[in-house]
Amino acid sequence: MISFSCDYLTGACPEILNALNKANSMIHSPYGDDDFSKESQQLILKACGANNGRVWFLSGGTQSNMTFIKACLRPHEGVISTNEAHIATHETGAIESTGHKVLTLPSGTGENAGKITAYQIEQAVIAHMEDSSFEHIVKPKMVYISQPTEIGTIYTPDEIVAIANVCKKYSLYFYVDGARLACAYAHILDFYKTNLFKLLAQSCDAFTIGGSKCGALFGEALVVLNDDINNEFKYIVKQGGALMSKGFIIGVQYSELFKNDLYLNIGKHSNNMAMQIKQIFKDFNFLSNSYTNQQFPIIPLNLYKHLKDNFDFSLWQKLPNDMVTVRFVTSFITKQAHVDALAKAVEDFNNKAN
Amino acid sequence: MISFSCDYLTGACPEILNALNKANSMIHSPYGDDDFSKESQQLILKACGANNGRVWFLSGGTQSNMTFIKACLRPHEGVISTNEAHIATHETGAIESTGHKVLTLPSGTGENAGKITAYQIEQAVIAHMEDSSFEHIVKPKMVYISQPTEIGTIYTPDEIVAIANVCKKYSLYFYVDGARLACAYAHILDFYKTNLFKLLAQSCDAFTIGGSKCGALFGEALVVLNDDINNEFKYIVKQGGALMSKGFIIGVQYSELFKNDLYLNIGKHSNNMAMQIKQIFKDFNFLSNSYTNQQFPIIPLNLYKHLKDNFDFSLWQKLPNDMVTVRFVTSFITKQAHVDALAKAVEDFNNKAN
Amino acid sequence: MISFSCDYLTGACPEILNALNKANSMIHSPYGDDDFSKESQQLILKACGANNGRVWFLSGGTQSNMTFIKACLRPHEGVISTNEAHIATHETGAIESTGHKVLTLPSGTGENAGKITAYQIEQAVIAHMEDSSFEHIVKPKMVYISQPTEIGTIYTPDEIVAIANVCKKYSLYFYVDGARLACAYAHILDFYKTNLFKLLAQSCDAFTIGGSKCGALFGEALVVLNDDINNEFKYIVKQGGALMSKGFIIGVQYSELFKNDLYLNIGKHSNNMAMQIKQIFKDFNFLSNSYTNQQFPIIPLNLYKHLKDNFDFSLWQKLPNDMVTVRFVTSFITKQAHVDALAKAVEDFNNKAN
Amino acid sequence: MISFSCDYLTGACPEILNALNKANSMIHSPYGDDDFSKESQQLILKACGANNGRVWFLSGGTQSNMTFIKACLRPHEGVISTNEAHIATHETGAIESTGHKVLTLPSGTGENAGKITAYQIEQAVIAHMEDSSFEHIVKPKMVYISQPTEIGTIYTPDEIVAIANVCKKYSLYFYVDGARLACAYAHILDFYKTNLFKLLAQSCDAFTIGGSKCGALFGEALVVLNDDINNEFKYIVKQGGALMSKGFIIGVQYSELFKNDLYLNIGKHSNNMAMQIKQIFKDFNFLSNSYTNQQFPIIPLNLYKHLKDNFDFSLWQKLPNDMVTVRFVTSFITKQAHVDALAKAVEDFNNKAN
């Protein structure tokens, strides 16, 4: 059975596992004050071209989102996201559990699938300001986007700058969830010749560099450029149970990821495998035009059943007329042979059908 | 200037003011243990035909909503409402401030404007249960409706029973916000020959009997039929800063409202005035088919401007083609002469126009 | 039966009741934008000699405390108080319900009974700063005191200034709960020739001017001098369910209290009655040296039983050797005849005993 | 430099590291549904002699504490602990951040240092019930203890049973924080011939089996015996950002810890090393009579300075007369040679002094 079901099914990539083994028996200062955490912070800030800011290493994505959002917002403030955002749908109300409302805007279609636009955000903020009962309504104070989105689409560099400009204009925090940032990074470097780390560091208050879904054993790097938030952020990390006593475990991993372009290469490889899958299903429609490691072809139920015997992947949505949306996910463990096998299986099906 | 702008612009109706004056210099037990609070509780439970339950007197509607919802839900549970619900839009995130997500469903059209249906609720609950990641999604555990709704429509007795049945089937709490319950009560008694208090007492875990917008100086009666919640509810009222030391002030008012059909008569009168306004604008469309004290005709901007000189009422929404939705609200202070003046002003405008 | 049991047993003093009756049938802008709220705000700020600041009218003390504290503190910050403070003991964890820890310091003895000192506060702040794990510990960010305290003692003007200085030195908010401020105000004016309103306005970020226990029907005026907090405070008031739609009801009352020295006179009268009670029990010890409307003599159980027949007052604490601490509370309803009757009853008991 | 400074300075013990390496490239079901998590759950429940219950694998201790406490308590309920408890002092208000008050009782002296007693708990509960204003006071609903305590002392089996009985009598949840449970387990097995896992499983609603400080790379096993809480607990784990996508990482470790008595042996070894340190300082007083891996001798400042050159350990408290309390911590990395070197260094100091 070949697995395309998700990107957090195994442990770490070999380089990281090796580094963890080496670091295991050394003595490390606790709570993120160890040398590896310091080194990896420097590597990340350098990659971002940032002269300020801090990097916080947390064990998961929901934790990163809720900790940063809680640290920024006053009680009456909320965070804007698409209605499909992870924080709006798949974190069991983590943001609300910290007292804050998620203010959802409908995501778009076509190239805007899974995304919100600077225009939408501005309209929402203006609508709030102009409402005569504005103080009876949660105040929008942050914008949250995922890069790539939940359905694999990408905010272009121009779109990120446009959102950043709206945020500056209306004093909104701008936060980017990069659970699968490696893929977005690789795509944007390749396609737009733009360094996404640098762009985000200039545009956002904070963004995450996902580890768990991008080759690490586990862990997220939360890069906070806004030093007003960095200032007492460690208290809030600790309060949320998100401060690892053995912080070096994540530090070691990010040191490795940011040496020898490992993070970039993991993204490149995942995208490369995914683009081949996109090609395999080129005769079908897709849920979204994804440039990254998640592909959502809309295929006949029969084909789905045929593939299920030898491949592990998700049924995303049942559709009328015996069609289904499915999801294939690639990662550092995906091999060319896996994709080739998938191509062959689809071809076999087509041959049989004709 | 004649005011139709809202139903909380003055103090109490004369009967209540009189009762407050009489009670003012007596000695009362504090924190709701006074004789008036006890008496009014008995009057209300009797009006509800309830053999159990308790009545809690709180100073406002947002407070009632957040206190009851917080008392019922565990951390991962949320409350279903329409996307237009007061808790979803106009309480500055009060529910989220207690840690809980408001799970909105789109309100309907026509007779369902401002409302959600039993069918929608059931579909939402089933969707949650059938999702393979259900534990990553806030669990629906309560249904919140307003009776009448924010736009004056009414849940019929059958609709209330249908929602109650879905709630029982899926172990959901059912809570009814009756900020303007007097109007719904009067309409349902008149039109369906059904006693709404008794119906709600049999159908819901809790409902409010609004005071501030129904003739009282201020205050809401929260009728909790679910004795598991009543059990330690007073702690939670106190914790929210909602336990009045001089609880008798609200008790006195509800004693008065539930004697001599005062609450019913306030509803009747408000509806009567509102139905005449509906008639005045019978040649126009309305935002909703309201049977209660809020009427939302869609009128030409010119007419709006004409009326503005002598009447105070709200501009609800600007529409294309120089049309506007406006809101007229009646209450115990609305006099026949006010409505007659409005009729005359509209007639004058029409005459001039022709 | 003559009642000395507490100061929130009846409605409003006659002047206030009269004013409410007059205002009842007028049309008022809702949510505190009415003329009475504006007028009373001006009267209060003038009494405080303040050129900035705003006055917020809330329905109760717990609500005022939790709303202000929640508005000021970031998630990891806490509020220092004595271990006997109302927020630490008798608000069912209202402060914790907003996510913040109450950091208690032991109250003193003698003249410091019920109080904390500037020195204690400074030591606590230094201890936090010097702890190597300070980020694992809630950060002290506000000081809360009650004036007068829960047991009737008074912070002298010098003590208030000293605490204010420590707060400034360490960037702590300073908040004063004045649930019974009328009594403190009257005592400090008389004894120290100091205007407490002006002193607090210069010293604190915010303080409350209690209404419910000082002659009003109900309500607290929260005077916020810190305009950073005022800025978006209305959102937070609304979120807590503490924004009255008919805000004029409290505004009217405070307009009355701040005309013709009514607030001062209520304090004076209450203190005067209380000082006579102190004199009646001059042969006994007291729980505290109270200068205000609560007196806590420590008397024989026999005397307690003797007085219980004709007077309503609280048993505060049972002590060894058949002694009990009791509490007598005076207010605007206390009459000279009540105190005379008490004096006579004690005298009778003593005569009988000898 | 030999380190006795804490027990979370390195990675995992060799057996665990080995197991992680083996599991690294396998495919695992996410979110704790993998085979290792299932196996380790079975091993733990078997070690507990439990026929019901579930084991939850979380990444840290603060997270375990806040997640379990939040899952159990209603809004007005609080948790009893000693004033020295980790939740009361060193979690930056994590419990308060979930809305709940920590109700502290003073810890004892002598054998009760760092502990609270069943008697204290019962008195606190009775005091609450008998208070006429009990609904204005946070309701005690859970007891939290640490085994061993923060200062290395141990609750005896009888003391645990006594607390469990009080909890049953008053319907309190009983929760045991076992961050260093290996040491308590080893000591109690050796000294009392009692199996602590079985005792806790019979006595508590939940307890943690600490990993990070007991030989694991990181992670805590939260054993919840109360199936009412287990029922929807996964939602709450996810909401707190505490549900690891790659749950197998912790599962693998606990499978290893519960095979071949590894967990027990780590505890035994740590205690053995610690008892030798206790012996080294036998001529001095100690902060507490610790039977576990933390030892707190009170030594002259000169000796402290002398040892500091070659050993890493904590200065716990400065005392008068040039004395200091210090802390030595042992763990699986402590070698006999380390302890011998310490013995020699102390002996050298004594020889020099004489």
Image (spheres, coloured by chain):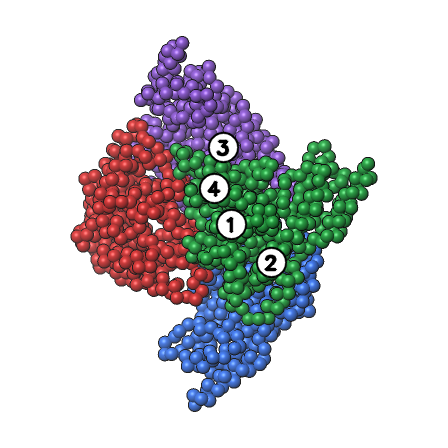
Chain colours: A green, B purple, C red, D blue
Q: Residues within 10 Å of mark 4 (few under 14, many from 20)?
A: many
Position of residue C329 measured from the top left corner of the image (x, y, whole percent): 28, 49
Which quarter of the figure is the N terminus of chain B placed in? top left
Q: Distance between the Cα atoms at labels 3 and 1?
A: 38 Å
Q: Position of residue A137 (x, y in %)?
A: 43, 38
Q: Which residue is mark 1?
A: A199
Proximity of marks 3 and 1: CB atoms separated by less than 8 Å: no
Q: Nearer the viewer, mark 3 or mark 4?
A: 3
Give the residue type that dot 4 points to.
Ile
Rendered image: mark on residue B84: 3
Label 4 SS:
helix
- Comparing labels 2 and 3, the label whose residue is closer to the camera: 2
Q: Are marks 2 and 4 in contact (CB under 8 Å)?
A: no
In which quadrant will I find the C terminus of chain B? Answer: top left
Please state if D314 lies on the left or on the right of A25 as rendered. Answer: left
Q: Where is mark 4, residue-wise?
A: B95
- Are dots 2 and 4 on a single chain? no
Please indicate, yes or no, whether residue D292 appears anywhere in the rendered image: no
Q: What secondary structure is found at the residue carrying circle 1?
A: helix
Which amino acid type is shown beneath numbered disc 1? Leu
Q: Which mark is residue A261?
A: 2
Residue C236 visible in the displayed image:
yes
Please state which of the two labelled residues, at mark 4 or mark 1, is closer to the viewer: 1
Rendered location of residue A61, percent (x, y): 56, 52
Tell me how far mark 2 sits from mark 3, CA to CA.
50 Å
Q: Is residue B187 above or below residue A145?
A: above
Residue depicted at 50% across the width and 77% down the height:
D311
Residue at 65%, 41% (x, y): give it: B130
